[in-house]
Amino acid sequence: MKADVTGISPEIGYKIGDVTCEPQRISIAGLEEDIADISEITISSDMLLADNISEKTEETIDISSALPENIRLANENEKNVVVTIRVEKAGVKTFEVPINSITKNNVKAGYKIDFGNIQEIMLHFTGDDAALEALTLEQVEKRVSIDLKDCTEEKSYTVPVTVNLPTGVFMAEDAYVTLKMQKQEEEQKKAE
């Protein structure tokens, strides 16, 4: 017995782990030539209601509907199979992104940005193992930005950090950076 879970989506930040069926074996009945070709019964993913899961989930399935044509259970009272789907937290990858590599969008004319003593920000990513493995600091640096359209006065702001991520990768947690908007002095404006 096995369960096909390809149609089940875990919650973002999680992945499907082990999937087990209990009982693992069932007794079937039918014509000898029909039974001879059967080595495994598969519970299709459309029989499972689990979706967007973030913890171990158990579902009881009537296995008789998964049997091939002309095959029946040897004991009709043993039709229930419990499918257990274990969910794991997907891997997390962390990068220290230099503050000067962040793209600054919509900086108000005549203003400059002061990040104070901040040299880098920590960004945590999660998702598909292969996509995480392929993710590099250089890729992240090119995709990180902040939008300063609402930063229009000379004061401190905490703004969200945006990362345009490749397919299969997600931010493990929201990231923010604190900065101060300062008016540029006249000499600095002319020099730029």
Image: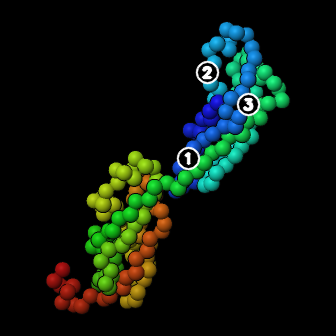
Are the residues tagged 1 and 2 within 8 Å (C-beta)? no
Label 3 sits on what residue type?
A: Ile
Label 2 sits on what residue type?
A: Ser
Nearer the N terminus, badge 1 or badge 2? 1
Label 1 sits on what residue type?
A: Ile
Q: Is residue 125 left or right of residue 182?
A: right
Which residue shows up at 24% across the image and 91% down it?
185
- Residue at mark 2: 39
- Residue at mark 3: 63
State the image quarter where residue 2 is shown. top right
The span from disc 3 to disc 1 (Cα, nearest Å) is 22 Å
Nearer the N terminus, badge 3 or badge 1? 1
Q: Secondary structure at mark 2?
A: loop
Are the residues tagged 3 and 2 within 8 Å (C-beta)? no
Residue 27, relative to residue 165: is it above or below? above
Please state the horizontal and vertical placement of residue 116, each as a whole percent of the image.
Answer: 32, 85
Please state the horizontal and vertical placement of residue 52, each as a whole percent of the image.
Answer: 61, 51
Residue 117, relative to residue 58: is it above or below? below
The span from disc 1 to disc 2 (Cα, nearest Å) is 25 Å
Which residue shows up at 68% across the image and 14% down it?
35
Nearer the N terminus, badge 3 or badge 2? 2
Colouring mode (rainbow / by chain / secondary structure / one colour): rainbow
Q: Secondary structure at mark 3?
A: helix
- Residue at mark 1: 16
Q: Would you call the spot at circle 3 few (<14 residues within 10 Å), some (14-19), or many (20 or more)? A: many
